[in-house]
Image: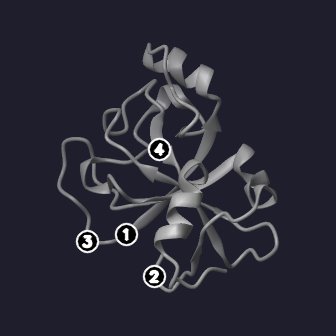
Amino acid sequence: MPGVRRCAPTTLKQLIDVVEELAAAMDLMEADGAPSDVLGTVNLRTISNSECGDYLGEDTIEKSMICAGAKNIGAGGMGPCTLDFGGPLMIRTWYDRDRYTLVGVATNRTGCGQPNQPAVFTRVYSFLDWLLDNTEDAVYC
């Protein structure tokens, strides 16, 4: 999303929209294909950490993680791929629909758009104090 100002979630109120819809910027690479030259987005649905653990067969999806997948998890094909790791998971801010708030960072915890495999992201809010302390000169929304 070139030219889109990305914001850090500085208050819990800014995270209310996270309950349903998220957008992840990704290079639209297929699991077995070549990366695209065009950065794209995909709409994802958040999944509770306990539901995420059920899908992944894991007991420990930590509070510092956020899970998201395609609206129909079983369909697969939507989520970060190899070149997307470290990429943003964002929501539109509730007060200005032209701004996006960074809520997650793509990890390599799951496969690339696999059926029944939600994507696992690092939850930015869990590390917000550290981020703010270490980016004092940054401009936030």
Task: Judge by depth and name the residue closer to the eye, 15 or 64.
Answer: 64
Type of the residue with mark 4: Phe
Type of the residue with mark 3: Asp
Mark 4 or mark 2: name the one nearer the start of the chain.
Answer: 2
Q: Residue at x 44, y 13 (%)?
A: 57
State the SS at label 1: loop
Q: Are marks 1 and 4 in contact (CB under 8 Å)?
A: no
Graded by Cα atoms within 10 Å as few (under 14), some (14 to 19) or many (20 or more), the crowding at tag 1 reads some
Q: CA distance from mark 3 to mark 1?
A: 7 Å
User: Does 101 sit left or right of 88 as displayed?
Assistant: right
Residue 88: x and y in percent read 46, 60
**Would you identify the image quadrant in which residue 117 lies?**
top left
In this figure, which residue is indicated by the disc labeled 3?
37
Image coloring type: one colour
In this figure, which residue is indicated by the disc labeled 2?
2
State the SS at label 3: loop
Q: CA distance from mark 1 to mark 4?
A: 18 Å
Q: Are marks 3 and 1 in contact (CB under 8 Å)?
A: no
In this figure, which residue is indicated by the disc labeled 1?
39
Q: Can residue 69 be seen here?
A: no
Question: Does residue 56 lie above or below 122 as drawn?
Answer: above
